[in-house]
Image: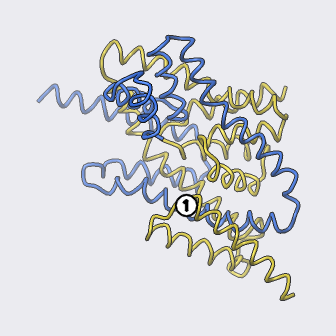
Chain colours: A blue, B yellow
Amino acid sequence: MLPMMRERFVEKLHWINEDELAELTAIGQSSPGAMVVNTNVLMGYRLLGFWGAVCALLGTALPPLVILSVVFCFYDAIRGNSYVSAGFRGMRAGVSAVIADTVIDMAAPYLKREKMLYIPIMVLAFVFAWFFDVNVAVIIISCGALGAIFGILRDRRRRSS
Amino acid sequence: MIYLRLFISFCIIGVLAFGGGYAALPLIQEQCIEINQWLSMSEFSDLLTISQITPGPIAINSATFVGMKVAGIPGAIVASLGFMFPPFIIVTLLFLVFKKYGHLTFIQDIINGLKPAVVALVAVAALGVLTETLWDGAEVTVASIDMFSAVLALAAFIIIRKWKTNIITTILACGVLGVLWEFVSAFLV
């Protein structure tokens, strides 16, 4: 997605420069939600203020909204067909593989030495979600709070040394 | 009212979906299957499949799909707006904070803490999809594993890990094999 944004906004339209795009992407990634939507909203702010941001939001959301609405109608109409459901069963196997691959890629960076600290969080979150069925929101909020505490402790240590 | 419930549920998903494309998965699963029963696990797997092979962020695709299913086109619009509303506010605030201080260290600390949890939660969601793939809603025992799906998933996994094949092509190829298998088993029986 990022290369496409760079090509369009930086190289073709010259709306912003490379550094600004990197900055906007960093802010976009720091916010919840879809990164593309966030980055485009920020681009809207940068160019035209509030209404620019609103336009960027609607512009980014409209294509997937239309595409998925159409796809849903097709899906709803043909899902009863036995060959269609066989196709979906096959694709489901592929999707399981893709997600497993993604989870491994997401987890791999935490095996590095300087990130070891976060492994207990990962293990605890898994145990609470899988075995105790704890609410996803509760887990995310408490781990975010833990991260904030780690940050405050680190700043303290830095200040005292 | 259904529109309000859709909007609020997707607001909750939007406000907590930190850490990349897949981060919304466990939240969507919780809001749409467990709390509200808008989707079955099998429909959720189909939704994921469709999201993977169409462009656009998974969360907006999901909001549209669920909204369409529950309340038609207005539902799709309300759910998508619900998902985008909290991030819109938050991104605005972060933009102002960044303009003022030139960094977002505090929010990045929070994200550093929550990201490993998100990895774990996505893993849990992945196990849910895998269970659906291997057992298709049947009771989970060794004997009731769907062997065709198991072999296909394992083969796809090995191929993706080894050759980093294109996701869409791989998923579509699995779909074609699924249809062929249906043909073959129809002839055999």
Report if residue A135 is visible in the image.
no
Q: Which residue is mark 1?
A: A98
Which residue occupies the extreme bottom position in the image? B188
Front one among B27 and B82: B82
Q: Report the side of A146 relative to B3 (left or right).
A: left
Q: Position of residue B28 (x, y in %)?
A: 66, 42
Outermost residue toward the left in this view:
A161
Residue B85 position by quadrant: top right
Tell me: B149 left or right of A110.
right
Residue B30 locus on image (x, y percent): 67, 44
| Label 1 residue SS | helix
Residue visible at 72% across and 31% down?
A: B79
| A23 up-or-down from B143: above or below | above
Q: Residue at x 51, y 28 (%)?
A: A38
In percent of the image, x 34 and y 25: which residue is there? A17
Q: Which residue is farthest front?
A: A12
The x, y position of residue B142, in whole percent, is 67, 79
> Label 1 is placed on what type of residue?
Val
> Is residue B18 at all visible to an observer of this figure?
yes
- Picture layout, residue A158 above or below residue B58: above
Residue density around tag 1, few if under 14, some if 14–19, many if 20 or more, within 10 Å: many
Is B102 located above or below residue A99 in the figure? above
The residue depicted at 14 percent of the width and 27 percent of the height is: A160
Q: Quadrant of the C terminus of chain A?
A: top left
Count of residue discs: 1
Picture quadrant where residue B27 is located:
top right
* Towards the viewer: B176 or A111: B176
Residue A25 position in % (x across, y down) = 41, 31
**Front residue of this view, candidates B55 and B51:** B55
Chain for numbered disc 1:
A
Left-right relation of B99 to B18? left
Please state which of residues A55 and A34 is positioned toward the viewer in this rendering. Answer: A55
